[in-house]
Image: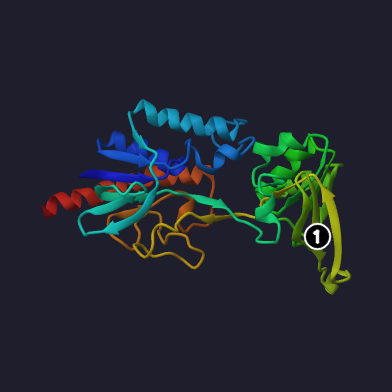
Amino acid sequence: MRDLVIVGSGPAGLSAAVYAKRAMMDVVVLEKEAFSGGQIVNTEQVDNYLGLPGISGFDMGMKFREHADTFGVEFDDREVTAIEDHGDHKKVSLEDGSSIETKAVLIATGAKHRKLGVPGEEEFTGAGVSYCATCDGAFFKNKEVAVVGGGNIALEDALYLSKMCSKVHLIHRRDEFRGEKILGAQVLETENIEFHSFAQVTEIGGTPGKLNLKVAVNTPKTVGGQANRDFTLPVAGVFIAIGTSPVTDFLGDVVELDDAGYVAAGETGQTSTPGIFAAGDVRTKAVRQVATAVGDGAAVIHYVEEYLNGLKKKA
């Protein structure tokens, strides 16, 4: 019987693992991916994490994992398929048919890239369609590419790609960016980035490496535009950066989720089911950053300890 099973080894899961080991808990971290770090490993550069300015996301993820390793945190690469609540203990089912019995569970699975859902997207994924500019940008050196989105990741991707690509088309369904103003200003000032506002990709065609993006522009008349203008962009690749969705499909109804699929949990991390906690990007919260995920992981262990102490008193 474990004290705690942590599902996921992004910043929240790794932070929680360190604090759990310091609290002398019998803890194991379940991570189905080949490496730890979560989404941050796909970020070219992180400038807003205190004490580590200018570090690459991959290096940051590796540092977080190394810190956990120094405490002797146990890792297991089997995928979790279900979590069952049995009152004072939980059952975590794994892909190989085995299971782990534990007193408490921490869900720290984060979120994954959201897809456009247009014809051709699945067909050309890995053959011109990418969700990670820092991973695949080098394949499109001196070529024309497109980025879809208007948040921080889309703006960062456009700026990153502009340094190596001949031209970057930034396609966004609004005329204002959702990302930080400083990034938006940099994008608009970059000579080889062309901003297409009120635009949406409706189809991806062509051949691998030679894509034809069908784009529909619907400019509101209130801004003096003409509606229903369509055009096609010939590009070598398209980078989709329209946000993320939580990794909660394996949870079933064991905990309450909000309308968007995030785990309903406040600052304590306690979910609707006693003994099951959530931390990081997977839970309901206003701000999703590395710093907030790390803070979640640190804080939630205090409440896990309180829960485990309560079990001891009942015994």
- Tell me which corner region of the image, top left, top right, bottom left or bottom right, holds residue 273: bottom left
Q: Is residue 261 visible?
A: yes
Residue sitting at x 43%, y 28%: 66
| Disc 1, SS | strand
Residue sitting at x 86%, y 61%: 231
State the residue lying farthest toward the left.
315
Q: Is residue 51 visible?
A: no
Q: Quadrant of the N terminus?
A: top left
Residue in the foreground of this view, choosing between 223 and 226 = 226
Badge 1 crowding class, 10 Å Cα cut-off, few under 14, some 14 to 19, many 20 or more, is: some
Residue type at the position of mark 1:
Lys
- Tell me which corner region of the image, top left, top right, bottom left or bottom right, holds residue 173: bottom right
Residue sitting at x 60%, y 55%: 114
Residue under numbered circle 1: 214
Q: Is residue 73 above or below residue 241?
A: above
State the residue lying farthest toward the bottom.
221
Residue 202: where, in percent of width, then height? 75, 63
In the image, 23: left or right of 30? left
Residue in the foreground of this view, choosing between 242 and 16 = 242
Residue 183: where, in percent of width, then height? 72, 45
Residue 306: where, in percent of width, then height? 25, 49
